[in-house]
Amino acid sequence: MARLAQAIRLGTVATGDRLPPERTLAKQLQVSRVTLREAIAELRDAGFLESRRGRGGGTFVVWPGHPSHPPGNGDGHAAELAREMGDALPDALDFRRVLEGGAARLAATRTLSAEQRAHLTETLRSSRDRDPRTRRVNDSRLHLAVAAVADSPSLAAAVADVQLTLDRLLAAIPVLRRNLDHSDAQHTAIVEAILAGNAAAARTTMEEHCDATAALLLALL
């Protein structure tokens, strides 16, 4: 999805134009045709693409955030926020990866109380909520909970700062079901590693989670 969204964003296909044939596009993006179909389905559901039947049919770009489309709709807000951040955006994403990966690792080395374990479990459950009005907040609460059980006030404050920095951008991009599924699975693996005291797995999975979020965010912006 990130590769396809990036190709659209860079102007490979203009808004209103039809995507290249499946075989050609899969080769260009270096993914399988099955993977391409899944990505197209997700981006179609999110309003990036539109499928049309009949003569002259196919899959067309309708993404409002595309450079060839007038600004002011959908992703235009997210793109404007990204432009405002400039070089601070990739720096914030790099910092988040190192910071939150370290927080997860440290949390897994702590002896957690029953209350702390219950809080992690509860915030994980809440983070799976798909209600668009609460999803973003609950996602952040889980990351903050991980930092809190690491038992380092300075670390918790830094995680809160980086979450605040990226919050508006993450809230502004389209919600993709498959991305949410992937995020939920990674959140679960992170919490399970922390509760099991597996510091290496907690750090690695959190870093992979941050990498996936960064890739999708940069592609959509």
Image: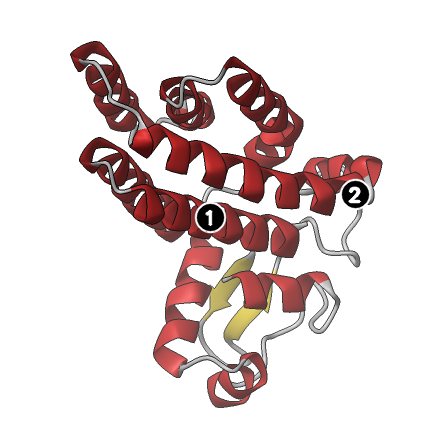
Residue under pointer 2: 71
Residues marked 2 and 1 touching at CB (< 8 Å): no
Question: Residue 216 at what x, y percent from top left?
Answer: 55, 53
Residue identifier under label 1: 207
Residue 151, image x, y percentages: 41, 17
Query: Residue type at mark 1?
Result: Glu
Residue toward you, 138 or 45? 138
Q: Element at badge 1?
A: helix
Residue 79 higher or lower than 112, as above or below = below
Secondary structure under badge 2? Answer: loop
Position in image of residue 168 (x %, y %): 63, 28
Q: Amino acid at mark 2?
A: Pro
User: In the figure, is residue 50 to the left or right of 64?
Assistant: left
Number of numbered discs visible in the structure rendering: 2
Q: Is residue 4 in sight in this rendering? A: yes
From the viewer's perspective, is the residue at label 2 or at label 1 nearer? 1
Query: Whole-percent x and y of residue 86?
Result: 82, 42
* Label located before the other in sequence (2 or 1): 2
Work out whether residue 167 or residue 46 is closer to the camera in this orientation and state it: 167
